Image (cartoon, helix red, strand yellow):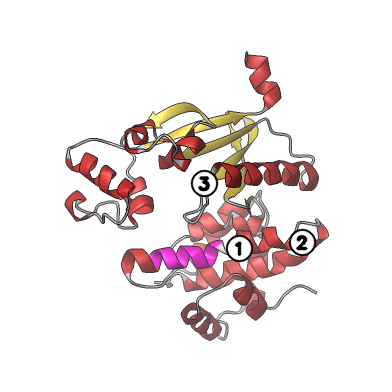
Amino acid sequence: MGITRNELYDRIHLQPEIIEKLDALSEQIDISGLTGDLERMMDRKTARPAYLQLKELLSEDEEHLKMLYCQLECARRLHDRYREMQIPETIFTETMRCFARFIEECRVRTGRMFFDRGWWTYRQVSMSLFRIGALEYEMKEYEGENVIAIHIPSDADLSRESVDVSLGRAEQFFRTCYADYEYGKYTCGSWLLSPALRASLAQDSNILAFQERFTVIEEDSEDKEFIEWLFQVSKDTDYRKLPERTSLQRNIKERLIRGEKVGSAFGIIFNSEESNGEA
């Protein structure tokens, strides 16, 4: 039953350089001695404290590959759980490909391959977050009620059609596989929702179309996380040294040099019943 480590690595397109290092680690780590920690990290209710405890146990881990090894072991074990819940294989594969994507993002940003997202990926290995088409969806709470938080992967296709398909598939997924999880809103906190972007976007922009789906609740003009996502460099990079590979990068760079801000925003998509109730 289940899949082997090599089958998982192949399925998620894990980089050969990383696989070689993980294979070496497999001879050093007694995974049977960590079973309790892994089981807790695979549970949505205990995932975060389990991650923090495991992080402390694996403290001597400069490239965080021990954590990567452990989280991928969780992913491997989850495969059977996905099957039991009749979750499509495509969702399992798309969800777990985040590991290779994050490692590649590290390579682009720093020139080195390593793993720096264990603080995030405990969500994937606890079945709290799923990639469904273009977007990722996480079961969370907002103001005391269940919501689905939308996350935007760096390789997301934000065309209107692609987002429509993703949202439709996600709605079906949660109503089918998590029928007891009652929610009435989709939320999203991202630089891509920042109203400050509008001056740099064409009217037919996919980003603008994505923004229009949300009712913006709050803005944070001081947030600088967008620098890492848009420019793929450290957020403390000198603005004058930011790359200009795309028109959006050029426009935002010019604005930053002029002292303008981009920031981020938090928005909500209300379901039809809730929207009608507010009207």
Quick one: label 2 or label 3, which is nearer the N terminus? 2
Q: Is residue 164 magenta?
A: no
The mark found on residue 65 in the picture is none
Q: Which mark is residue 81?
A: 2
For disc 1, the marked residue is 96
Figure quadrant of the C terminus: top right
Between discs 1 and 2, the one toward the N terminus:
2
Q: Quadrant of residue 40?
A: bottom right
Q: Does the segment drawn in magenta span residue 105?
A: yes
Near-viewer residue (56 or 148): 148
* Residue occupying image coordinates x 64% and y 65%: 38
Could you tell which of marks 1 and 3 lies nearer the N-terminus? 1
Residue 103 is situated, as x and y percent measured from the top left of the image, at 45, 67
In this image, 28 relative to 76: left or right?
left
Label 1–label 2 contact, CB within 8 A: no
Task: Name the residue nearer the viewer: 133 or 114.
Answer: 133
Amino acid type indicated by mark 3: Leu
The image shows residue 139 at horizontal and vertical percentages of: 64, 43
Q: Amino acid at mark 2?
A: Arg
Predominant SS of the magenta segment: helix
Label 3: which residue? 158
Distance from the alpha carbon under mark 2 to that under mark 3: 30 Å
Camera-nearest residue between 127 and 249: 249
Q: Position of residue 180 (x, y in %)?
A: 79, 39
Where residue 69 sits: x, y (%)?
Answer: 56, 73
| Range covered by the magenta-colored residues | 98-106
Find the distance from the CA under tag 1 to the CA under tag 2.
Answer: 14 Å
Q: Secondary structure at mark 1?
A: helix
- What is the secondary structure assignment of the residue under circle 3? loop
